[in-house]
Image (cartoon, rainbow, N blue to C red):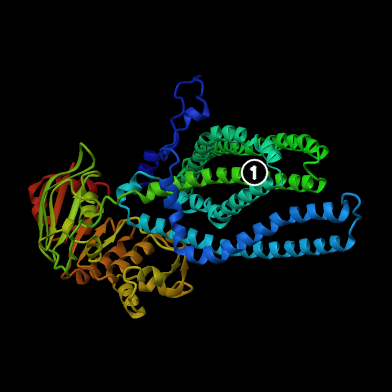
Amino acid sequence: MNTNTQRTAKSPFKSRPSQEGQQSKPLNERFVYQDDEVIDKPFNWAEFKRLFAYMKPYARQMIPLVVLMMVLGTITKLAVPFLTSMAIDGAIAPEPPAVPNARLLLILTGIVLLLYIIQWGANTYRIKYTNIIGQRVIYDLRADLFKHIQKLSFNFFDKRPAGSVLVRVTNDINSLQDLFTNGAVNVLIDCVQLVGIVVILLLINWKLAVAVMITVPLMFIISTRLRVRIRRAWQDVRMKNSRINSHLNESIQGIRVTQAYTQEHENMAFFDHMNFTSKRSWDKASAMNQAFGPLIEITGGLGTLVLFWFGAYLIQTGQLTIGYLVAFATYVGNFWDPINRLGQMYNQLLVAMASSERIFEFMDEKPAISDKPGAVSLPPIRGDIELEDVVFEYEKGRQALKGISLSVTAGQSIALVGHTGSGKSTIINLLSRFYDITSGKLTIDGYDIRDVTVESLRSQISVVLQDTFIFSGTIRDNIRFGRLDATDEEIEAAAKAVHAHEFITHLPGGYETEVEERGTVLSMGQRQLLSFARALLANPRVLILDEATASIDTETELKIQDALKVLLQGRTSFMVAHRLSTIRNADNIIVLDHGELVESGNHDQLMKKQGVYRGLVEAQFRFL
């Protein structure tokens, strides 16, 4: 893709004021960035269940042991305050005429110490095991998302920056880790603990329990008013982070253009603006989260006042002992802790749901190109291709191809030429079914390509692009990407056929030389040669060369042309080229203009017509 075109289409920058003395617009008005739409739908249990369905495969592992440890830890924790009340009333300060009992105090102290040891062991085991299960759930979710993204069609990626997709697989899924590792089990623990405490408080003195709990409804009413605002605030945080990732990815990819046009200051200013808005969004969401803490503390404080005021009255009237009041106070303190944690957990759940909505938005995206019901596997093809009145629109109402009809016999080499935007790349995208035609018919060996499986179609077509992508790894691995079961000998044979073997053997590690993403240690011509070797190793029946020789010097191009004469025998090939010297020997040259087929024939025939093709050739050679 042309770098300048891409930058213009997605540029975050508006033009600077052109009139002298005109005031600059505020930063948030000068910079406009297109990103994902805000997902705004109410919290629903169906989506919540969908998220936690990922835990089902591990339910049998989790329930018996983890729940046992959870119950054991909760029981030991609830037993300690009761034993404390026994120590006070029975051993430390018994009612007269009884006297302090050191032996009973020692026994109760030993029991409490044992309970603490049991509680520590149960909690340690539970945390360790839930972390393992939680990480497995995150692994499954990330794998499913990535697998689904691999199936999505080109039009999905056309509408979204790469950073926006990246943030779903990384940040949004990472934000679910605490929920799955500790959150779900902690909710169960806190709920069981709350029920146990309430029951115990009612058994100790139901009047005091009711008096203390009267503040709970007040807390619930206030907290529910915050939940919608908190959820929307965390959605906004995720969206801002997605924008930063998208801009960062674009900035790194386009760093050469940025520096070439000395736009570093504009880029930094835009990033500072995005960084500031992200920080402000985070501060807002965090402030709402922190509101729960003071809310619980204030409510707990009111409950404590009621406890000691009414508790003192009950002691004076003989309805409650000092030991039970101490135990009651401890249970009340333990009551507000899980309430506080549940409030924080609810906030964490809102954060997780904001991320899960963004994840499931991608998961629910249906591939525009997919196998229709009853699609058959395309058998080994000869390479006869037919386009019958093919019309295609990238956007509704804007035709990129206008009724193209073309018949190609197996083994023919077809060149597609024309001005930029004439429809050359569109035709080869349709051949590989990266997009579906709007109307008309496209067949290979008589099979409508929409009636066969996508995998069986693309496995018999190789595409070599102008912008060659080199994966991180060795030279050998990059060539082997064309056919993963290829032997080392077959890889080297493919490299020799396209004259890549010579430069590879001169590299420090030969075929084992490590290359980074995009192949920065290689020249553009060398990367192109590797893409030739990769395509030829796949042994396709149809070979598509999209400006594949644009980055190769003339001497290397001549070598490749010699190799292609042999390697293209028996294969159908399509060549898109602006350098018309590279397609002189094509069997049929198709001339396109604004999505229409205006001329066809071999080089000599088209030159005699003195039409569009001859004009292109003469215009090109005038500048040589």
In the rendered view, tell whether residue 485 sits above or below residue 530. Answer: below
Q: Residue furthest front?
A: 97
Q: Position of residue 615 (x, y in %)?
A: 16, 45
Residue at the spot of label 1 = 340
Horizontal relation, residue 232 to residue 528: left or right: right
In the rendered view, tell whether residue 511 sits above or below residue 599. Answer: below
Q: Position of residue 146 (x, y in %)?
A: 40, 57
Q: Secondary structure at mark 1?
A: helix
Q: Position of residue 14 (x, y in %)?
A: 44, 31
Which one is nearer the viewer's eye here, 30 or 4?
Answer: 30
Q: Position of residue 262 (x, y in %)?
A: 50, 40
In the rendered view, tell whether residue 502 sits above or below residue 403. Answer: below
Point 66% across, 39% down: residue? 293
Horizontal relation, residue 414 to residue 151: left or right: left
Does the image show residue 456? yes
Q: Which residue type carries mark 1?
A: Asn
Which one is nearer the viewer's eye here, 166 or 597?
Answer: 166
Does the image show residue 358? no
